[in-house]
Each structure stands twice: as C-alpha cells, then as structure tokens.
Image (cartoon, rainbow, N blue to C red):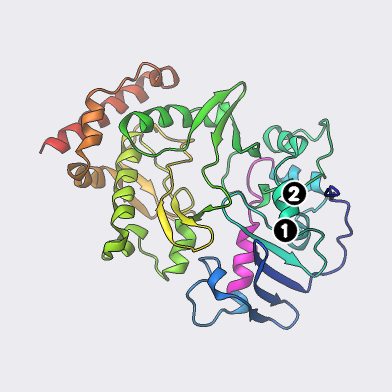
Amino acid sequence: MFTIPTGNAEHKRRIRHYTIMHENTPVLEFDRETDTVTLFNAAYLPFGLRGKKNISAVSVFEWLSDRVNNINRTYMNLVYIARGVGRDRDKVIKDSSGISFTDNFWIKTNDSIAGWEMLKQLRDDNLALSNIALTGRLETDGDPLEGFTSLFTTKGYFPKAVFGGYIYKSKKDAILEYPAYLIGKQIGVDTAECEPEGEYVKIKIFTDYNTSLVHASELKAYFDTDDEIYNVLLGDRKYKNIISGLQRMYIFNYIIGNPDLHDDNYGLLYDSHTFEFISVSPCYDHNVAFAEGFLGLTRTTIGNSASLPLDDLCERFIKRHRDIAEKLKRIDLSETEKYLTDRQLSELRQRIENTIGWAQQ
C-alpha cells in the first residue's frame, strides 16, 4: 500500500539533478550546476530530444520548462497556490514529477518522493484539486495537496480538470466540443468522445499507458522543421495511413469551421514502448469551432500569424475521401443544431454543401 504524499514536502532545497524518466527507465540526467547532460538510454528519449546528434543542456532545459509551462491557463494560478508551489518551476516539477496523461515520461529529482508505480496509482485522483481547476474557488471539500496531478503538463487556455479518465471543461467554454463530436461520429472521422454532463463537458482521454500522444509542436522539433507535419511525412510511403488521417482531419476541421487547429491541437499516437507511430490522434479541442464568418483559415502555431487554408485543403482532399461526402449527404443535424446559433447553422450547412460539391467535381 502506498502512503499518499502531499504537497507539504520540503521544497526549499535547490534541485541540482533532473532525470528524465520513461516509466522505470532513466533516459538522461541534466546537472543544472555544471550544465552537463548524461544520456542513459537513447531509445526512450522524448521526441523533442530524439534524433539529435548532440543533446545540449539548453535543449533539455527548454524541454523541461515547456513540459510544465501553462501558468496562463485560466485558474491555473489558483492550482499553483493550492499545491503550495507558487510559480517556482523547481517546486512544480518536484510536486508533480512532470507527469502527463499523454505519455509515460516523468521527471525525477535528487530528492523525489515517488516512483513510477506510485505516480500511476495516484495520478489525477484528487477531486478537490479538479474543482479548483474548473471553478477557481479555493474553498473545497477534500485536500488539494494529495496525490499527483497532470494539470501542470496539460496544455490549453480554457479551465479544465483531469479526473477519472476524462478531461472536464466548463460547458460555457466548451459546449461546442459536443456538436463537433456528433458531426465527426456521423461522417467517420475519428474524434475524441465527448458529452455534456451537468455544468461541464467531459472528453474521454484517448491515450493510455500503451499508447501515447506527441503533439505536432514537438514533432517539428523531432524533424527539425518549421514546415507542416503533413508535408514532412508526405514523401515516405510508410506514413501512407497517417497522411490519409491528416487529410481527413483537415476536411473535418473545415466542415466544423475551426480556426484553431494549431500545433498543440493535434498530433500523432505512438506505441509507448517502441515509439513507432500508430495513427493521427483523434480530433480534439473544438472550443471555438463553428466560428461565425469563418473564412477557411486556421492558425497553425501559437504566438504568430501563420495559417493554413482549410477550405483549399478540403477541396483538394475530399476527392480522395468521398465516403465523407456521401455521409454528409445523409447527415442528421437535429441534435447538432440545438447548440448552434442560426448563423452558425447556416454557415455549417454551406460548408457541408461546398464539401459535397467539391467531391463531385
């Protein structure tokens, strides 16, 4: 039986050694005082550090920092307060061990209090902390210091909590996730399962300890490119199924009018132990879909104006995926229309009509 650790552990000592772990395997160690990197097992490197001839201290530090960099998410400042870590990266890493629900990496420090089995057992089982993350209210039943949380490694702007195998978001922020899911389900595009529940929308987590997710933003570091992942993979026949999946993703995101398909809002699933790519991830994160006046453009990165013309991509690719167009001819929008304004519904119907028309050209 595990003793449940709490955030009251002594944080004051400066962390000298960060060890990136993959389950029970040490991958590399970063000594921050000497700025040296010791590689233990290249086979288990995260994609952001994978394939590099020389892994610099700077690249490791950037990976570690990006791993727990989400202070700008609404209410996350209160999660930091509730866990007693302030905005101190060392305290955040020590408190959470850098765990994530998307992969099997974690960060061991020179005085870590947990191993992989404990992290797995006690990850994201703190309902009190989930309530703080969703509501911004510190007054809650239960102890927000218990267990371990992946909230520090979970990306995104809108408030969210991770609990019981689901991501929870406030209905007022995320209700459009549901009609997007209904459309994806009907037209045969793999979309993260989603449903309203009371004041919230819950999205089923599609990763597990055998299947991990790497975001497109990290894949760009892996392939050492600023180009779109689609273009990088296009010339290699072994990625044929992934290319097809990306094409369907572009078509779907045009249909639902999503202006926010950036590099952290899609990625590839891979085998957690062989690191072989399996497929494109299910489509997810459609908080701002059905944008009124959608012109077909979606941003591709966070922090600059780069964009992709989803309308052009849909017109180009739908001829290879006519099954989507055939399903669109028979789509039932009776449930979907309950969540859309008249304008959103009218523009959705127009995009559906466009897509069917392009398939017939």
The number of callouts visible is: 2
Residue 139 visible within the image: yes
Residue 263: image location, x then y, percent: 45, 54
Label 1: which residue? 97
Would you say 227 lies left or right of 149 here? left
Q: Quadrant of residue 323?
A: top left
Would you say 314 lies left or right of 214 here? left
Q: Residue 87, labelled with which disc?
A: none
Amino acid identity at mark 1: Ser
Residue 354 visible within the image: no
Quarter of the image for the C terminus: give it: top left
Is residue 341 on the magenta stretch? no
Toward the viewer: 79 or 342?
79
Stretch of the chain drawn in magenta: 59-75
Is residue 63 on the magenta stretch? yes
Q: Quadrant of residue 127?
A: top right
Label 2: which residue? 148
Residue 138: image location, x then y, percent: 80, 35
Would you say 99 lies left or right of 118 here? left
Q: Considering only vertical position in the picture, is 266 above or below 45?
A: above
Residue drawn at 55 percent across, 75 percent down:
42
